[in-house]
Image (tube, rainbow, N blue to C red):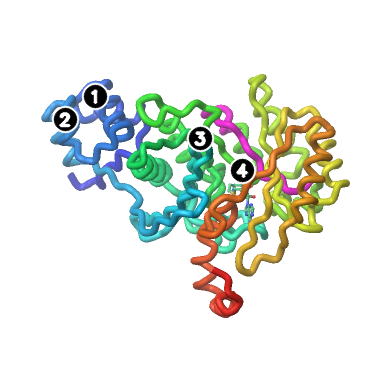
Amino acid sequence: MCAAPINLLNLDRQGCEQLAVQLGGKPFHGRNLFKWVHKHGALDVQAMTDLSAALRQRLAAETVIELPRVVREQQSVDGTIKWVMELGDGQRIETVSIPEPRRLTLCISSQVGCGLGCPFCATARQGLSRNLSTAEIIGQVWVAARRLAEHDRRPSNIVLMGMGEPLANLKAVVTAVNIMQDDLAYLLAYYRVTLSTAGLVPQIARLRSQCRVALAVSLHAPDDALRNELVPINRRYPLAQLVDACRAYVAADQRQRITWEYIMLDGVNDHLHQAKALVRLLQGVPSKVNLIPFNPFLGSDYAPSPAEQIAAFRERLMRSGIVTTIRKPRGDEIAAACGQLVGRVEQRRVRPSQVAAAFAGGVQ
Ligand code: SAH
């Protein structure tokens, strides 16, 4: 065998079935294998007792289970846990577990860094290093699920809202979503997996044809001029195209709606006339708006909107019949909140003067 071993975490159920057949077994052996890996968290093929000795032998010789390695775990006072995970090539990503009274949401990454350059996001500062493989995406779930099981908890929801733009890594993401939703693996109903995008319009239709997930869109501005600035990919795919693609995404399913994420930046996008413009923009699209208080990070140029302004903005939307929620920042003090992932580590490297100033000012 000179080919590189196959990382079993790259395979969904169908992939495992095909592999089993290739190695001389039957499709149902592949299903058993898949279940061992994800449902039981087995790392040793010899423990997979319902596979024949011959198949186990070949699996041992030709496959591996290579997981991201947790290099740091931080727990916030609110119960949020952030894991820094190191990949095979030494790159680092972050995964966050967010407990709520009736659910437990995992926020996972889809890329190392991000190439979209939104100026309010810490991840954007590091640029894009590379896409994650399916194994690296689902590996975050595998690792988190095992750690949470030690406390008798399991993820009830997964959001692709960590580092990266998931639609820029569609193929690997779709396979990972298949695994999350498979009842032999993580058993999540489609509406419990949410993918958040900055608006890669052509990929939205592709996503719809390849899997079923709830869609969240980082809107952040009600008009093209402002959105070009805040979400630069808007220059390529302006609002009219984005809204059309989203309308089509939910068209086939009465129960689906788009979640529009809208970060609240003081004096930038939080005026009431902008709420009114938002109402006009979203007319006819089954929608929910999620207002996100801006989480500042070292060196960011924006300020969070005051709580009263956020409440007034919400009120204006609600009055027009748009269900609007305000996202509660979680894990703020461990830099696990939206837009903060890996930011501090990165800035420590590139901006030592600012870090020194922050320490002098008592931050952290
Ligand atoms: N690239 C995808 C998913 C990752 S970001 C996307 O853009 O949707 C997840 C959410 O956090 C997005 O809505 C993003 O705009 C928001 N976000 C980024 N930086 C933030 C910050 N500093 N404070 C609050 N939310 C932020």
Instruction: Determine whether 357 is above or below 215 in the image.
Output: below
| Magenta region | 206-221
The amino acid type found where label 4 is placed reads Thr
The amino acid type found where label 2 is placed reads Leu
Q: Is residue 176 left or right of residue 5?
A: right
Q: Which image quarter is the N terminus in? A: top left
Q: Nearer the viewer, mark 3 or mark 2?
A: 3
Q: Which mark is residue 29?
A: 1
- Circles 2 and 1, Cβ within 8 Å, touching? The answer is yes
Q: Which residue is mark 3?
A: 103
Q: Position of residue 186 (x, y in %)?
A: 40, 31
The amino acid type found where label 1 is placed reads His
Q: Nearer the viewer, mark 4 or mark 2?
A: 4
- Residue at coordinates 24% horizontally, 41% vertically from top-left? 43
Q: For label 1, count other residues whose C-alpha is less than 10 Å away and answer few (under 14), some (14-19) or many (20+).
A: many
Q: Is residue 159 left or right of residue 200?
A: left
Q: Which residue is mark 4?
A: 197
Q: Is residue 26 left or right of residue 256?
A: left
Q: Position of residue 146 (x, y in %)?
A: 34, 41
- Residue at coordinates 72% horizontally, 28% vertically from top-left? 286
Q: Which mark is residue 55?
A: 2
- Asked if the stretch drawn in magenta spans residue 212, the answer is yes
Label 4, ligand 1: CB separation under 8 Å: yes
Upstream in sequence: badge 4 or badge 2: 2
Upstream in sequence: badge 1 or badge 3: 1
- Residue at coordinates 59% horizontally, 32% vertically from top-left? 214
Where residue 183 sits, quadrant-wise, is top left
Q: For label 3, count other residues whose C-alpha is less than 10 Å away and answer few (under 14), some (14-19) or many (20+).
A: few
Question: Alpha carbon of mark 1 to alpha carbon of mark 4: how far?
Answer: 36 Å
